[in-house]
Amino acid sequence: MEKKKPYLAVILIQSIYAGMFLVSKAAFDGGMNNFVLVFYRQAAATVLLVPLALFLEWRTAPPLSLVTFCKIFMLSLIGITLSLDINGMALVYTSATLAAAITNCLPVITFFIAVLLRMEALRLKTIVGIAKLVGILICLAGALTLAFYKGPHFKLFCLHQLFDHQHSRTPPSRTSSGDETWIKGCLLMLLSSTFWGLWLVLQGLVLKSYPSKLLFTALQCLLSTFQSFAIAIGVERDPYQWRLGWNLRLLAVAYCGIVVTGVTYYLQAWVIEAKGPVFLAMSTPLTFILTILCSALLLCQVITAGSLLGGLLLIIGLYSVLWGKTREQRMMDGENTNSLPAHHVDQGCTELKVAAAS
């Protein structure tokens, strides 16, 4: 049973993310402002994480300099506030299925940004380098397919319209203007993923000067709460949009802010420590599969052949890049192990595990 726990954990993680896309999309279609949802989501995450961070890491945390604080502020602005706000706008224009599909190119986008910043190497004269480049190109083809190709429409058996919408926001029609809206949503989704990937790359640099991970995350959530509030209050002045009753809006806020941020943060850290970051990244396509099924069965959304084909290309591109990255890491680990004295081998393996977990 112990060996099955990481597999059960990644299924739960990806199921939670699929639920995030579905609940958010349902809330937006029900009329909730996406900027307001991001603010409430970050506020809920802050309420959850700040007490935990202060209790667990306050005494051992290093001093927070003004320069480091400014870096964390910019990180939270780019990687959390703007990324989530843009993602919410894209989700209004498109669908939960497309949002889940685009997440498959996040590891590829992150790798590409790392290459541009010269934090990763792309050696085109090796099989590993070619696999990474092919993966990037396939992901690009998948994104273009999602944006520009619709194809035949499929409607699976709809079990139940899970969410009944009052003050519903009419989804864009599939006319020429609707197609333009869909393309705009795809581009916004890619922009959101680019900001997210940039955030993942730059986090490693900031964590070197401020290694308290939980406090680091809680501070980003706190700063993002203020940032997202400033954006939301500037965009939305209708008091109705800010009301939270016992309805779908409260469910979306609680789910995205507490379950997604709190539960998945712990589970992802545990899975990375147990099986490594590549194992977690390879489970990402589960979100796409689960979202397709739930969108069709519970939200009664139409699935297009373009969405299926584009998602498949993104998954193939993801695995191509991950295969190249994994093989490169094994080659580097083998070289490092062979170059170490015998009594240093165990210590080196331990350090590699710690590095993967971080």
Image (cartoon, helix red, strand yellow):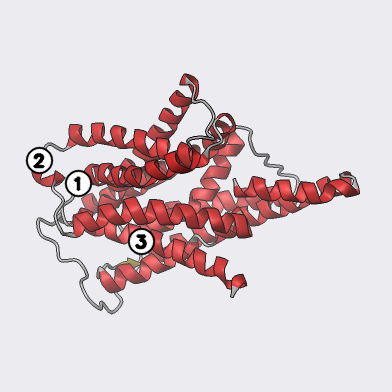
265 with respect to 7 (left or right): left
In terms of secondary structure, where does tag 2 sit?
loop
* Nearer to the camera, 146 or 50: 50
Which disc, if any, is residue 132? none
Earlier in the chain: of badge 3 and badge 1, it is 1
The residue singled out by tag 1 in the image is: 33
Classify 10 Å Cα crowding around label 3: few (below 14), some (14-19), many (20 and above).
many
Hey, what amino acid is under mark 2? Answer: Asp
- Residue 238 is labelled as 2
Label count reads 3
Give whichever of discs 2 and 3 has the lower sequence position. 3
Residue at 25 percent of width and 35 percent of height: 229
Looking at the picture, how far across and down is residue 51, in whole percent? 38, 43
The amino acid type, in three-letter code, at marker 1 is Asn
3D distance between C-alphas at marks 2 and 1: 10 Å
Residue contact between numbered discs 2 and 1, judged by CB atoms under 8 Å: yes
Mark 2, other Cα within 10 Å: few <14 / some 14–19 / many ≥20: few
According to the image, label 3 marks what residue? Answer: 97
| Residue 5 in sight from this viewpoint | yes
Q: Secondary structure at mark 1?
A: loop
Quadrant of the drawing holding the C terminus: top right
Give the left or right position of residue 18, taking residue 270 as reference: left
Q: Position of residue 294 (x, y in %)?
A: 33, 70
| Label 1 crowd (10 A; few <14 / some 14-19 / many >=20) | many
Residue at 34%, 58% in the rendered image: 20
Q: Nearer the viewer, residue 56 or 202?
A: 56
Residue 136: percent from the left, percent from the top? 56, 49
- Between marks 2 and 3, how big is the CA–CA gap? 30 Å
The Cα–Cα distance between marks 3 and 1, rounded to whole angstroms, is 20 Å
In this rendering, does residue 149 appear at all? no
Please identify the quarter of the rendering in which residue 26 is found.
bottom left
